[in-house]
Amino acid sequence: MYLSSQDQRWYRLAFALAILTVVYNLLEGLVSVWFGAADESLTLFGFGLDSFIEMISGLGILAMVLRIWRHPGAPTGRFEKTALQITGTGFYGLTGILSVMALYNLSTQHKPETTLAGVVIAVISISLMWALIHYKTQAGRALGSEAILADAKCARVCMYMSGLLLFSSLVYSLSGIWFVDSLGALGLAYLSFTEGREAFAKANGAECSCHAGS
């Protein structure tokens, strides 16, 4: 199938955005886990673990962009399906871990030392996620690609997670209410469960809904 020079530019943009998503999630995961452990903030720590899972998902998206760029209409590749299955399993595992740890922290009235790092990381993440959603949507519409548009919609969940991290971290910083961090972690657990469900749905060939109507 012949692609115009304009389509080639849009596919190059989509490919660059996919690479940026993978690299950013890796860096975000490392920084968030480090500060989450150091500050004893479960929400930030869980957010970091989520970023590592998102990185694996991003590798699948990267393969998807390459597939539809080079071979439009080709079926989903094995690597994409495997990445989605690993991603789904990871999200379900994270749901369980965060739920157990959050309930334990609630029972012991544990609170983080500080959540300032969570505020900073969340603001950066929200800004970047908004830009990624915007440009992925532009690329998807220009190319008429439902797959790229679905990826843009699914990125909204990442922004919801960043918003939840910002809210819980900011509320704790301003009020010092001890259980806010644990409630934030439970919120992340719920969003992780929905992402796991979506990952397995996509692995089975379903379109990503990802709160598309939100």
Image (tube, rainbow, N blue to C red):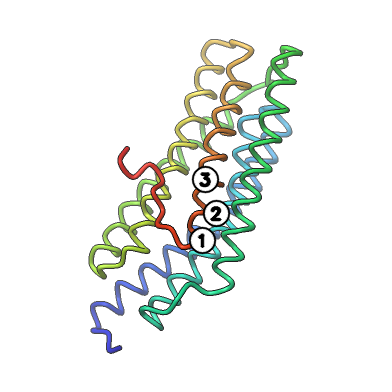
Instruction: Please rate how many residues cluster around mark 1, counting C-alpha atoms within 10 Å: few if below 14, some from 14 to 19, many from 20.
Output: few
Instruction: Please rate how many residues cluster around mark 3, counting C-alpha atoms within 10 Å: few if below 14, some from 14 to 19, many from 20.
Output: many
Mark number, residue 195: 3
Q: Kindly identify the residue that appears in the image at 55 percent across and 64 percent down.
A: 59
Q: Are marks 2 and 3 in contact (CB under 8 Å)?
A: no
Amino acid at dot 3: Glu
Q: Kindly identify the residue that appears in the image at 53 percent across and 61 percent down.
A: 203
Q: Are marks 2 and 1 in contact (CB under 8 Å)?
A: yes
Disc 2 to disc 3, how far (Cα)? 9 Å
Q: Is residue 94 left or right of residue 202?
A: right
Q: Is residue 74 left or right of residue 170?
A: left
Mark closest to the chain's N terminus, 3 or 1? 3
Q: Are marks 3 and 1 in contact (CB under 8 Å)?
A: no
Give the x, y percent position of residue 32: 63, 40
Mark number, residue 107: none
Mark closest to the chain's N terminus, 2 or 3? 3
Q: In front: 108, or 44?
A: 108
Above or below, 139 against 72 in this view is: above
Above or below, 177 against 78 in this view is: above
Labels in figure, total: 3
Q: Kindly identify the residue that appears in the image at 51 percent across and 14 percent down.
A: 174
Q: In front: 86, or 115?
A: 86
Disc 3 to disc 1, how far (Cα)? 14 Å
Helix, strand or loop status at disc 2: helix
Q: In front: 206, or 119?
A: 206
Instruction: Please state which of the two labelled residues, at mark 3 or mark 1, is closer to the viewer.
Output: 1
Give the x, y percent position of residue 162: 48, 37
Label 1 belongs to which residue? 204
Question: Looking at the rendering, which quadrant does residue 180 occupy?
Answer: top right
Q: Kindly identify the residue that appears in the image at 42 percent across and 68 percent down.
A: 16
Mark number, residue 200: 2
Amino acid at dot 1: Asn
